[in-house]
Image (spheres, rainbow, N blue to C red):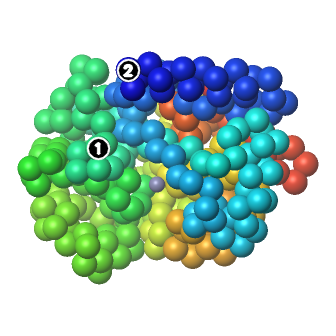
């Protein structure tokens, strides 16, 4: 029943959005585990749903400077509901030669993350994951490294975390249990380093001390996992210069967002945005002083 209601709500929003001038759609797949396979050149890539989250439009995350009315006005112009903001949580699996690589791990079972259920819909098991690449150490990206029993979720994997983010994670008292479990698996790298045969990290300053994206390349095909450069396809692109409270260095975060979005639009780069509606794949289009999301499903 709950699912049917959620689906009906999605249909209603979807219809409203299609009538609006801006093409921003909510999650094209109803809530629940889901895996979608595609290819980047010769590489098999799978988008994995962890969770669909919404946060209230209360000025705590978006609109800390500009207020909730300004946030509501931007959402309304895109045909979206104005009382809440959608934030999906998704991850990627990349089969890179002998390596089976997970890019981020979602919230984890303790926070009702569904990543492992989504992984079950593929031909891969947690034991087959050889490497985990972390964009940054916020709970919605590293929470899934630990099972509900408090053990390593990907026991055979090397967990790659940028050196600045690993140092920062170890300073946080509320992350001590997770740090203890994953410590034997962690290998650090410098932002910008090559981290897998077909994947190079890209420094994206501001969100956390060592926040990175991951550039996946196969032949002439490319896909850039942008991590938390952006959070919502309406607000992050319509107002790239607005601060977001999730950024540790908010001024640097906004500066990075504006500069990188301009570059991504100019290069017609195909990106994966973990917090955009599943599967979060598409391109950025420049429109005047801002940007719009062009999902490619
Ligand atoms: Zn995040």
Compared with 37, 21 (above or below) is below
Q: Position of residue 89 (x, y in %)?
A: 44, 43
Q: Position of residue 284 (x, y in %)?
A: 72, 40
Res. 295 in view: no
Q: Position of residue 238 (x, y in %)?
A: 77, 50
Residue visible at 46% across and 44% down in the picture:
53
Residue 219 as seen in the image, left or right of residue 292? left
Residue visible at 13% across and 36% down in the picture:
127
Residue visible at 39% across and 73% down in the picture:
164
Residue that label 2 marks: 1
Quarter of the C terminus within the rendering = top right
Residue visible at 31% across and 42% down in the picture:
113
Quarter of the N terminus within the rendering = top left
Q: Position of residue 35 (x, y in %)?
A: 38, 24
Compared with 44, 241 (above or below) is below
Please tell me whether mark 2 or mark 1 is closer to you in this view. 2
Measured Cα–Cα span from mark 2 to mark 1: 19 Å
Instruction: Say which quarter of the image contains residue 97.
Output: top left
Residue that label 1 marks: 112
Res. 48 in view: yes
């Amino acid at each position: 029943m709950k699912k049917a209601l959620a689906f009906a709500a999605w249909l209603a929003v979807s219809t409203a959005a299609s009538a609006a001038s801006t093409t921003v759609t909510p999650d094209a797949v109803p809530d629940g585990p889901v895996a979608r396979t595609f290819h980047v050149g010769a590489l098999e890539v799978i988008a994995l749903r962890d969770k669909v989250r919404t946060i209230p439009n209360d000025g705590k995350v978006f609109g800390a400077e500009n207020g909730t009315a300004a946030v509501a006005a931007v959402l309304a112009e895109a045909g979206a509901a104005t009382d809440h903001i959608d934030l999906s949580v998704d991850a990627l699996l990349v089969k890179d030669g002998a390596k089976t690589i997970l890019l981020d791990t979602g919230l984890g079972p303790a926070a009702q993350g569904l990543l492992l259920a989504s992984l079950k819909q593929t031909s891969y098991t947690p034991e087959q994951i050889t490497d985990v690449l972390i964009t940054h150490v916020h709970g919605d990206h590293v929470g899934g490294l630990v099972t509900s029993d408090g053990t390593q979720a990907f026991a055979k994997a090397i967990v790659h975390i940028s050196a600045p983010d690993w140092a920062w994670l170890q300073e946080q008292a509320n992350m001590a249990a997770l740090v203890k479990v994953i410590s034997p698996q962690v290998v650090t790298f410098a932002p910008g380093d090559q981290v897998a045969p077909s994947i190079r990290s890209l420094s994206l300053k501001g969100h956390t001390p060592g926040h990175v994206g991951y550039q996946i390349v196969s032949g002439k095909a490319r896909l850039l996992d942008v991590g938390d450069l952006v959070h919502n396809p309406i607000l992050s692109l319509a107002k790239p210069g607005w601060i977001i409270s999730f950024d540790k260095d908010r001024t640097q975060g906004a500066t990075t967002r504006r500069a990188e979005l301009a570059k991504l639009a100019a290069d017609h780069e195909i990106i994966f945005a973990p917090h955009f509606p599943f599967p979060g794949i598409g391109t950025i289009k420049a429109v005047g002083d801002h940007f719009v999301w062009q999902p490619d499903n």
